[in-house]
Every structure is written in C-alpha cells, then in structure tokens.
Image (spheres, helix red, strand yellow):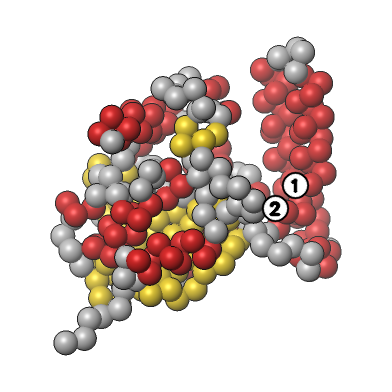
Amino acid sequence: MKQARLALKKFYEQVGEKYPEEQEVYHTLRGKLRKIFVLFHLARFHGSLLDIGCNRGMYLNEYHGGPLFGVDLSRSALQHAVTDSSIRVVVADAERLQCLKAGSFHHVLCSEVLEHCLHPQLVFESITHVLRPNGTALVTTPNYRHSRPMWIGLGVLRDYGIESECAEGYFHTAFRPEELAALAQNAGLTVVDSGTLEKEVKYAAKIPAAILLLGRLLNKPLRWKKLEQANEAFFHKLTLWIHYFCHFTQLEKLLLLFVREGVRSFILVQKKEERI
C-alpha cells in the first residue's frame, strides 16, 4: 500500500508541474459547465472553505465568503498556485486529513479528486473530520453508466512529458450519485442533495465525437501528432459551438428532455450537530 501511495504521489507531482489542467480543461464545454456549477454552490457558502485537491487554486481565488485553505497531494501544483496572502495551502493526502484540526471548516469543496483516490471512503472520513457541526461539503466526480472505469491511458498528458509506472496509464475511476451517497452516509454525513451535471455534453458532443473518431481512424497509419492535436481541438470547439447555438435558440430545452443524466455526479452533504 505504501508503494502504491508513493507511486501515486510521484505521478501527480509530474502532473502538477507539467500539466496546466485549469487552462486545458476549463475552456472545454465540460469544464465550463462544471465551473458554473461549482461556483453557483460556492456563492451560497459563507464561512471558512477548505478545497481538497485545490490544484493551482482556481476555485480558492473565486471564493469570497470567508477564510481560505487548500490542500493538494502535489507540492509542484501548489508551487504554481496563483494565490495571495489570504489563502493558505499545504501538501496533504485527501485520504489522511487528520493532520488538520478537527472541526476546522464551515465548508469543504472536493471537486474532481475522489476518482483519483484508491480509498474513497477515507476521503469522506477526512471530510467528516475537518467539517464543523452543521458544515457542508460539495463533492463532484465523473459519472458512468455500465461498468466502472478503473484505469485510463495517459492521452494528452503524454504530450506534456508525463509518464506513468503502470502500463495501463493511471488510476481514474467514477461514481454514480447513489454510490457517493453511500460513502457519505458511512462517514456519518447527511445527504442534502445529489444528482448529475453536464447533461448538455450528451447532445452537444455527439456529432463532434463522430468527427473525432473519424479523424483518429484516418490518422492511425500516419501518427501525426499535430493532426491529432488539431483534431482534438476541433472536437472541443465544435462541441462548444453546438452548445451555444442550441442554448441561444432554445433548442436545448427540447434536447435535454432526451437526456436522463449528465456525465458527472455530485453530492452535497452536511455534518449534523451531535445532540447530547
């Protein structure tokens, strides 16, 4: 287990140093929708906030409701964090936040972190530990439909010189809302709300995905990196254009009637005050 933790830390040190995730992900439709969702909830929080897996501090810099604190497994990511003196960050493992004082925070954000952790139950126990009584936490993760993913290839990370010790790539799983609810309840938390988000991706990415797959097929014998990158960039741009068109023409309302759930899960939980 210790060896697995060390390998995980080594991998995310590379990611934190070399991969500008907040620039790469949050200009795509998925990233934009996710950021809107998270910021909507953060705007309703008032009090101290702990961002678990804060990366380079994007959400910390967007929160204005109280004192700010961030933790991340990657020291290199925190060294790249754009923060001011009002934001405190520290290297820590999301599964082991007992290093922080119990009941320290009014609110916790844990967005796109749980799917990278080998022991998700420990993350929820960490959230319970750091939350004040009546404190709330928002957790988001990828969703899945059929079989749970476990490992994915490096993909675009390889273009940034990131390597993995595992042939499969790197650990990256997903959770359905009811699975998040079970983990939260096992940690003594009360579910306030849960569900899925990024439903718009389901209609907006269908045609671009077909073009993306065709481009990959044509490029398979050529293996041109620039063509592969251009194909990926066009996929994201076309997805955004389709979403904007459907949104402003109100066609989106009709299309969403055929979308049962989004590509991402979320849960909002509360730590109830103990009664004597």
Query: Which residue: 69% across, 33% down?
Result: 233
Q: Quadrant of the C terminus?
A: bottom left
> Residue 150, percent across and down?
51, 40
Query: Which residue: 71% across, 64% down?
Result: 260
Q: Nearer the viewer, residue 23 or 166?
A: 166
| Disc 1: which residue | 205
| Disc 2: which residue | 201
Residue type at the position of mark 1 = Ala
Q: Residues within 10 Å of mark 1 (few under 14, many from 20)?
A: many
Q: In the displayed structure, would residue 21 be above or below residue 166? A: below
Secondary structure under the numbered disc 1 in the rendered image = loop
Left or right: residue 140 compared with residue 132? right
Left or right: residue 131 compared with residue 165? left
> Residue 108, percent across and down?
34, 62
Residue type at the position of mark 2 = Val
Q: Mark 2–mark 1 contact, CB under 8 Å?
A: yes
> Residue 254, percent across and down?
83, 67
Image quarter for residue 197?
bottom right
Secondary structure under the numbered disc 2 in the rendered image = helix
Q: In the displayed structure, would residue 38 be above or below residue 230? A: below
Q: Nearer the viewer, residue 115 or 178?
A: 178
What whole-number distance in Å separates the C-alpha atoms at marks 2 and 1? Answer: 6 Å
Q: In the displayed structure, would residue 117 be above or below residue 43? A: above
Q: Nearer the viewer, residue 89 or 190?
A: 190
Q: Residues within 10 Å of mark 2 (few under 14, many from 20)?
A: many
Image quarter for residue 268?
bottom left
Observer able to see residue 54: no
In the rendered image, the residue lying farthest to the bottom is: 276
Query: Which residue: 82% across, 44% down?
Result: 207
